[in-house]
Amino acid sequence: MTLSEELLWRGFYAGNTFDKPEDLDQKTHRFYFGADPSADSLQVGNLAALMMCRCFVKHGYHATLLVGGATGQIGDPKETGERDLKPLDEVVHNKEIIASQFKQVLDIDDAATENGEFAIVDNFDWFKDVRFLDFLRTVGKNFSMTQLLDREFVKSRIGEGGSGISYAEFSYSLMQGYDFWHLFKTRQIDLQLCGADQFGNCVSGVHLIDRLEGKRAYVWSLPLVVDKVSGRKFGKSEGNAVWLSPSKTTIFDFYQFWRGASDENLEQFLKFYTELDRETIDDLLSQNAKNPSERLAGKKLSYEITKIVHGIENASLAEQATDFLLDAPKYFSSALPVELRVWLKENLPTVIYDTNMTTADILVLALGISNREARELVKAGAITERKFNDLLILKKGKNTFILVENVK
């Protein structure tokens, strides 16, 4: 399967500036993908774009990942209103975390960095030396206000009922265009990958390269990931973010998110978030249609994507933990393996049992809820309990588990 064939099959295509998709197969381009450090972790919406990047790398493309230390100080404009400016020390902290997540997801080792196949850059490194007048003369003079005012996010912000837009955020598109031009000159990068919501900003770079260099550059975008059941897109602004950082979304919760994927979302998720081939995915979907209660496709999806984001050991332990929590005696006849017990304590709310504790007391300690809420949950029969040796496992709802230790 060629690169263009795989992109089209997986659904990794939205707006692009190529004459036809097959042009991707004729020449190996150097590409870049960028993310602003607006949070201390990427989330699963960003992850879809990184999986597309993996696809390009697999087909021989050299990747540069840009962490927006400069653009992150301004903030990518939203359609609904101005972003809060991040403190500079927070931007620096976020940059470091996002760079490490880039490397993990793309499976980048030191050798790839040393031989030039991969690089991480920070646009603060060149913007800190750009003088304002030079920027206006070089970049600003090459964009018309008509062109910039036609951007959707600008129209929504300055139109009737809009919240307005600052000059800083209005200039964001020009900064992103400058990034592309800079990387074109210094790293021979002529392709930018992005989400569909960034396509307009990325085309600014194509325009600037054409005006200043007389050369052609390209953009390839993928559609935003939308939950087919709720209709909500994946992203932190939607309030439903699932993060790549285990300090924000535990590995157990990350695994459970994918394992519980609805049947309507399974095909897209398997194509977007795994590297399984067509035959394997078709077989999984067929098995799932015949025996939906076995959740074979969801289990495979959750294992594969947890392996990519958190490593094979964590994926295996998440799988074992799920089996244990759902039916402990079936999997461990005597004692819980030490490694798994430690992992469970790292990923689940854990309480040390005291003889005076009630179930409501445990809920308050583990979940941070009020005594009244805890008593109501117990009274409503919303909490199930199961004992295994010196452990008590409490379950609330579908995927909320509490580990209670030292139960006699």
Image (tube, helix red, strand yellow):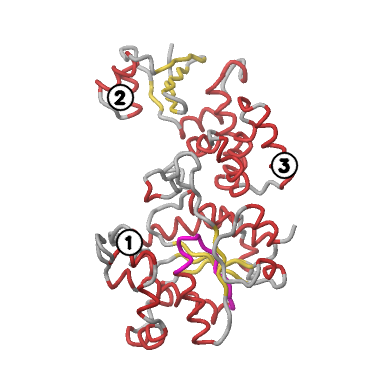
Callout 2: 10 Å neighbours few (<14), some, many (20+)?
some
* Circle 2 residue: 364
Q: Earlier in the sequence, mark 1 or mark 3?
A: 1
* Residue drawn where x is 62% and y is 15% of the image: 333
Callout 3: 10 Å neighbours few (<14), some, many (20+)?
few
**Labels 3 and 2 touching (C-beta < 8 A):** no
- How far apart marks 1 and 3 lie (CA) works out to 45 Å
State the quadrant of the N terminus: bottom right
Q: Is residue 2 left or right of residue 247?
A: right
* Residue drawn where x is 71% and y is 47% of the image: 277
Q: Is residue 102 above or below residue 351?
A: below
Which is closer to the viewer, label 2 or label 1?
A: 2
Q: Is residue 302 left or right of residue 150?
A: right
Q: Secondary structure at mark 3?
A: helix
- Indicate which disc residue 89 carries: 1
**Labels 1 and 3 touching (C-beta < 8 A):** no
- How far apart marks 2 and 1 lie (CA) works out to 35 Å
Q: Earlier in the sequence, mark 2 or mark 1?
A: 1
Question: Front-most of 131 and 379?
Answer: 379
Q: Is residue 115 left or right of residue 366?
A: right
Callout 1: 10 Å neighbours few (<14), some, many (20+)?
few
- Indicate which disc residue 280 carries: 3
- How far apart marks 3 and 2 lie (CA) works out to 44 Å
* Chain part drawn in magenta: 188-200
Q: Earlier in the sequence, mark 3 or mark 2?
A: 3
Check if residue 194 falls in the magenta segment. yes
Which quadrant would residue 375 be assigned to in this image?
top left
- Amino acid type shown at disc 2: Val
Q: Is residue 277 above or below residue 209?
A: above
Check if residue 139 falls in the magenta segment. no
